Amino acid sequence: MGGFILCLNTSTIQPADLMTKISVTAEAGFQGIELWADDVDAFVADGGSLDEIKAALADRGLSVPSFIAVHDWGNTQGQAFTAAWDEARRRIALAAELGAPVIVATPPDGQVDVDLLVERYARLVALGREHGVRIAFEFLGFLAHINNLPLAWEIVQRAGDPDGCLTVDSFHIYRSGRSLNDLRAVPPERIGIVHVNDVPGDVPVSELTDADRVMPGDGVGVGREMLAILAEKGYRGAVSLELFNRSYWERPPAEVARIAFEKLQGILPAEA
């Protein structure tokens, strides 16, 4: 596995319960698991505890390189912003409790006031630092505005905080219509988490949705190319296989996790 920490994003094996996700991820051979706040909240609401989750992770030797996610912090106003900020604070604290050094921050949809977004992101990074958690700003390739890596990197840089970092996703880079070479401008230490996947070649780029993601190596090869660039740059952090493909959700989660691990191993560059 070299320098990459191989991780499974649990969106890949929905709708399994949280403990099943943890066990099959470890059994498949992954070193890390990317947890979602909604799954953790549902587990606790059903009578479980954070201590049980932490014990399950420790028993199976899994780290949590990244936690997902904080939303609605970038463009809400008034009471909506207060509520979003309180929820962001809660989720950041939850990430820290579970040992995650990074939490993903999703961007707002529609046309965005970039100056405001920069200000809000800087505040979010400062809030994360109180808990020892970095805020990995994400762009989404299908959004109207915050949809490409250069713009996301500009926002992180303008925030002026060295703890600021990016979420980098092969699907979103491809969906944005831009080149993977945009990655070369981002220092590896400013990448908080990498999401890896592939995309089918028979769907127009402008029509791709999250549900179209496929396993690494089963599409045009965007995941393989991205990891090669990252390895060349010296990135040695977590790479998390993230799919939202319902055809995989209909299969046994242990089978999907096993295939996911094999597929991810199959695209690793030799130097990684």
Image (cartoon, grey):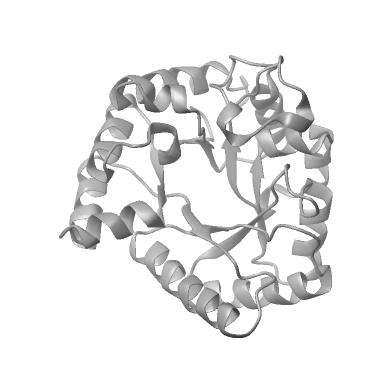
Q: Between 170 and 60, which is closer to the camera in this rendering?
A: 170
**Residue 30 position within the rendered picture, expressed as x and y whole percent measured from the top left:** 38, 32
Residue shown at 43%/67% (left/top)? 91
Residue 194 in view in this figure: yes
Vertical order, 72 against 178 (above or below): below
**Residue 234 position within the rendered picture, expressed as x and y whole percent measured from the top left:** 68, 39
Q: Residue furthest bottom?
A: 78
Vertical order, 191 against 210 (above or below): below
Q: Between 80 and 181, which is closer to the camera in this rendering?
A: 80
Residue 160 in view in this figure: no
Count of labels shown?
Answer: 0
Residue shown at 28%/31% (left/top)? 24
> Which of the image's four quarters has the C terminus?
top right
Residue shown at 54%/37% (left/top)? 239
**Residue 98 position within the rendered picture, expressed as x and y whole percent measured from the top left:** 34, 59
Left or right: 198 in relation to 22:
right
**Residue 225 position within the rendered picture, expressed as x and y whole percent measured from the top left:** 71, 24
Q: Quadrant of residue 117?
A: bottom right
Left or right: 58 in relation to 28:
left
Q: Quadrant of residue 43?
A: bottom left
Q: Between 251 and 266, which is closer to the camera in this rendering?
A: 251
Left or right: 153 in relation to 9:
right
Residue shown at 32%/56% (left/top)? 40
